[in-house]
Image (spheres, rainbow, N blue to C red):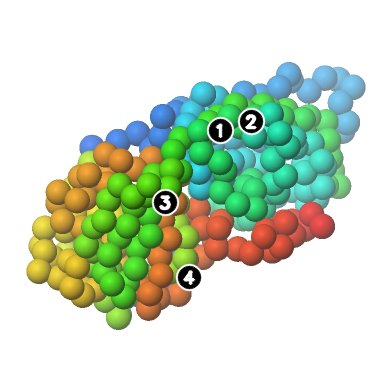
Amino acid sequence: MRRSRAWRTVIAAAALATLAACSGSSSDGAAPSSSGGSWAGGPSSSGPEASASAPAGKPVHVRLFQADGTTWGVGMPIIAYLSAKITDAHEFVAATAVTVNDAPAGGAWYFQKSAIYAGYPIEAHYRTEKYWPAHAKIHMDLATKDRSAGTGLVFDNSLTLDMSTGAANISKIDGKSERMTVTSDGKQVFSFPVSLGKASTPTFGGTKIVMEKAKVQRMTGAGYDLKVPWSVRITNSGEFVHAASWNGGNIGQRSTSHGCTNLTVADAQRFFNFAQVGDVTVYTGTGGPTMPSWDGYGDWNLAWGTWQAGGVLRTT
């Protein structure tokens, strides 16, 4: 399952609204999206309040999606949310210092418009040229307090972050062979038959990152309204890797879904229990366009040079 045939005309709005699934509306029995961070659960630790001598300007607050002590897959970007439409990101970039196992990370920020959280119209993603190393310790100092965010705008807090990566879990899904091969730290752990999106609702190609998991996910669309077990989200607009008991005759044989990756119930449960938020899935041979970078964590679908340029706020 995924979205209705009209998805192409609404995908941007759908992605920014963080839809539940398959043109759906809600999830049931959702598992925690990670071992820690979430917007409501206490992401950022903010710096001291601005003093009377701080530079004048409208305050811009920074919040982080990740929390200290959390562990993520190797494809997970660091995500920051900004409380105003800043006009200059150079000071934000200059204030950033990220290390991986105590060595400079050498990554870059990419800025994009956002409607994920009310009052935070800009989000910034930080990643390196390649995936994070597995089993790594990542530290970030974001010393933005009292720095300019553009004319008349001043950041009002600084932050730090300490997070880790888990195993390098990489799934490769091939639409031509109807097969999903899963490795962990370079060793194959699963090989599953799949059914991807049919020609009228093709699965996106490219690299997608596991966003969240739900033991039961409600999925709706033209002619269906289902509660689907063992659902692993990989796009905002509604692509999941999930169980599809109704499609058993096609799994491993042909692509007939609404865009999601259909697995047998047993295989879907295995993948659900294995997957961590931030894990990498790479899709080839789907017949669909490449996943847009903004439709979830599609960051890896942008060339490194494009990423370094900064997005909606040029940094080079």
Count how many numbered circles sit on residues in the image: 4
SS for dot 1? loop
Q: Residue at x 69, y 63 (%)?
A: 306
Q: Residue at x 88, y 31 (%)?
A: 55
- Across and down, in percent, residue 183 comes to 37, 49
Which of the labelled discs sits on residue 290, or is there none? 4
Mark 3 vs 4, N-terminal side: 3
SS for dot 3? strand
Mark 1 vs 2, N-terminal side: 2
> Rounded to the nearest whole Å, what is the CA distance between mark 1 and mark 4?
29 Å
The residue indicated by pointer 3 is: 170
Question: Which amino acid, mark 4?
Answer: Thr
Name the image quarter holding the N terminus. bottom left
User: Disc 4 vs disc 2: Cβ atoms closer than 8 Å?
Assistant: no
User: Disc 3 vs disc 4: Cβ atoms closer than 8 Å?
Assistant: no
- Residue 114 lies, with reference to residue 82, above or below; the image says below
Q: Which residue is drawn at 65% across and 53% down?
A: 129
- Residue 280 lies, with reference to residue 139, above or below; the image says below
Q: Which residue is drawn at 70% across and 49% down?
A: 108
The residue indicated by pointer 1 is: 136
